[in-house]
Image: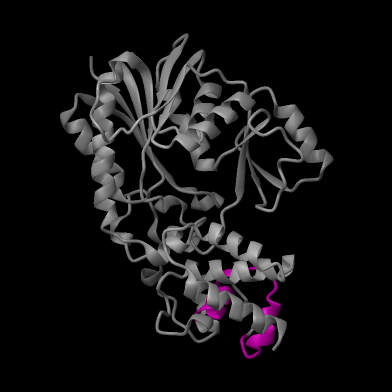
Amino acid sequence: MSRFQSQLNTATRLIESYRPGEPFHLYLKQYFSANRKHGSSDRKLIRDLCYSYFRIGQWISDQSISDRLLAAYYLVITDPMPLISALCPEWPVPTSHEPTARAAQIGLAWQPDLVFPWADQLSTAIDPTAFIESLLRQPDLFVRIRPGQESTVRDKLSRDQIQHRVIGKTALALSNATSLESRFSLDWEIVVQDLSSQRIAELFQTMPVRTSWKVWDACAASGGKSLLTYDHLPQVQLTCTDLRPNILRNLQSRLQRAGIPVEHVGVDDLTQRRDRSAMGKFDLILADVPCTGSGTWSRTPEQLCHFDPSSIDSYAERQYAILQQLIPQLEPDGYLLYMTCSVFHKENEAVVNRFCGSNGMELIEMKTFTGYADRADSLFAALLKRLS
């Protein structure tokens, strides 16, 4: 058996045995840890085969897993493909990156509606064709340069000859293979943060100038939005909560590395009604709510094969319930920044319109950050103001 056939067989077995629920990158990591016979080049090719398979969703689902793996790999990979030359010598070298043309070169009809069957449910600002084609490519690695660290970071980029793209004033796009920990002080010099998440700061520009801000990051996760807020608004007093104790411990370590003080960190289930008056009131509440994560599926394409569309409604109800719990803690004329990494209308505009319609909130600005033009995630945000 050839090496390439062995790699294809391994990828086929991995796809057959994978069950949804666990992130595929963790599943792969466990497999490679238990099977050290695979060298680095083997691991890369097997990984590329599997992720290519997921990126095509239910396209050509009538074919065998191994045939779909090969067709998906041909469609997705832009580097030279010796595996295809060895196992499918009749297939020509691709002459285009465009999926319709590539599929036609191997006698297949490209059907994007089988990759992403929910295009009719997208937010209005999302271009269905561009979004679906972006699912075929791994997004770049993005970092944000923190204030005062610009010259240090750029010196290190030059010294180590790190290939990068500069976007705006502080965003850098890097190869996903770039080693950051050995070169930069993470969270002090740079913050790993997707480009669309960085662009959330654009909404801060529509808020009034104040000498200080009391901010509650209500679904704080690992603290990326907290760092962004601290770096863009003056004299921020931070309170951070999340449902998950483990991730809050990561947040505290991260904010400590960043040199950012925090007033309070605590576990809070925002779907539950309780008295939160002891927290006081806030000038700004960040609500990066749980969602389908559909704006990030180019990073986790296994979702395309295992997504349950009924979860959109479930998430939308949960998001609305969370927003209602935040109102009592918001100062009159205070701001609420609602965010999802979803591309679905029901989780985005529909939730905001419903919430503003009956809760004494005014919509200041609503934006969909379509990251696919920059090889980034897509993200939705709406800035709301509590009427006094």
Residue at (44% x, 81% y) in the render: 109
Indicate the position of residue 335 as horizontal and vertical percent values: 34, 22
Magenta includes 89? yes
Res. 161 visible in picture:
yes
Residue at (36% x, 42% y) in the render: 290
Q: Residue furthest bottom?
A: 90
* Scheme of colours in the image: one colour
Q: From the image, give the main secondary structure of the stretch colored magenta.
A: helix
Q: Which residues are magenta?
A: 68-91
Magenta includes 189? no
The count of marks equals 0
Nearest the viewer among 98 and 35 is: 35
Res. 221 visible in picture:
no
Nearest the viewer among 264 and 71 is: 264
Residue at (68% x, 76% y) in the render: 81
**Quadrant of res 192:** top right
Indicate the position of residue 90 as horizontal and vertical percent values: 63, 91
Q: Residue furthest top?
A: 211
Which quadrant would the N terminus be assigned to in this image?
bottom right
Above/below status of 22 relative to 169: below
**Quadrant of res 259:** top right
Direction from residue 237 to residue 191 in the image, left or right:
right
